[in-house]
Amino acid sequence: MERKINKIEKECEEKHSNSEGSEQDKDYKTSLITLNVGGYLYITQKQTLTKYPDSFLERIINGKIMCPFDADGHYFIDRDGLLFRHILNFLRNGELLLPEGFRENQLLAQEAEFFQLKVLSDAVKSRWEKEQLASRETTFLEITDSHDRSQGLRIFCNAPDFIAKIKSRIVLVSKSRLDGFPEEFSVSSNIIQFKYFIKSENGTRLVLKEDNTFVCTLETLKFEAIMTALKCGFRLLTSLDCSKGSIVHSDALHFIK
């Protein structure tokens, strides 16, 4: 009799446990929401979409406003499906995190306003304003002879990252030595000064070396700067000093994106 009672108790416990498990599974499934945004499906949790009270998404999920459904029964929102991933990431992370080179600030700001996420809208506009300000600030790099500043090249650009890239390249190459000439140069925020330039019949050459055989001339450096700029999406706005009749012979280059 005691064994029979124990068996019945065990069966009741198992049923209760299974009942709790199935309730938990049900609750978990109902907490998952699938959205169809402009043809793109997104699956996320209800608490993510309702993070900001009175936002467009919070009002939809909590039934405060009506939203159409697609053929599969998912909420359908007729907005930019690709940009919505940034909206969703903001809801998940609580901060604006965009990929490098993102250029759709204006469109994202419009999406943020549509979804009535003021915090996101303000963050996008702030980022946009900073980029606009940075684009108007022209930076430069000057490569010159410490004894004769008329010898050298000046590179102007409205993107500090590009200037930093060119600067890093020149410093890296300059670490090589040329037989018979010491490698001596100083680097500041915007100027690279060489203690020596090598004089030759072909003109002035920087003390730079790509490998054991090739020496980088000033003209080569100009071409390299132009090619690097084009590959990075910049264009040569103008040669700031065209008095010598050729970009190759000019003393300055100006790039803009």
Image (cartoon, grey):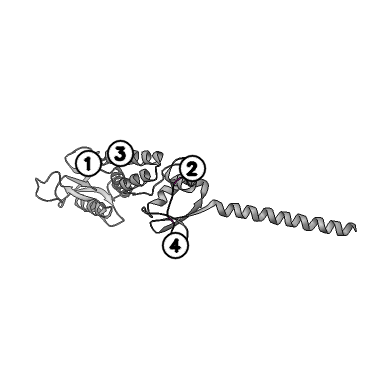
Cα–Cα span, label 1 and label 2: 56 Å
Neighbourhood count class around disc 3 (C-alpha, 10 Å): few under 14, some 14–19, many 20 upward: few
Query: Foreground: 165 or 55?
Result: 55
Which residue type carries mark 4?
Ala
Foreground mark, 4 or 3?
Answer: 4
- The answer to whether residue 151 is seen in the rendering is yes
Q: Which mark is residue 103?
A: none
For marks 4 and 1, the one nearer the N-term is: 4
Q: Which mark is residue 144?
A: 1
Q: Would residue 88 appear left or right of 24 to someone viewing this image?
A: left
Residue holding disc 4: 71
Cα–Cα span, label 4 and label 1: 68 Å
Which residue type carries mark 2?
Lys
Provide the major secondary structure of the magenta segment: loop
Q: Position of residue 186 (x, y in %)?
A: 30, 39
Q: Position of residue 177 (x, y in %)?
A: 31, 49
Which residue type carries mark 1?
Thr
Which residue type carries mark 3?
Glu
Cα–Cα span, label 3 and label 1: 34 Å
Cα–Cα span, label 4 and label 3: 41 Å
Residue holding disc 2: 51
Q: Residue at x 48, y 47 (%)?
A: 63
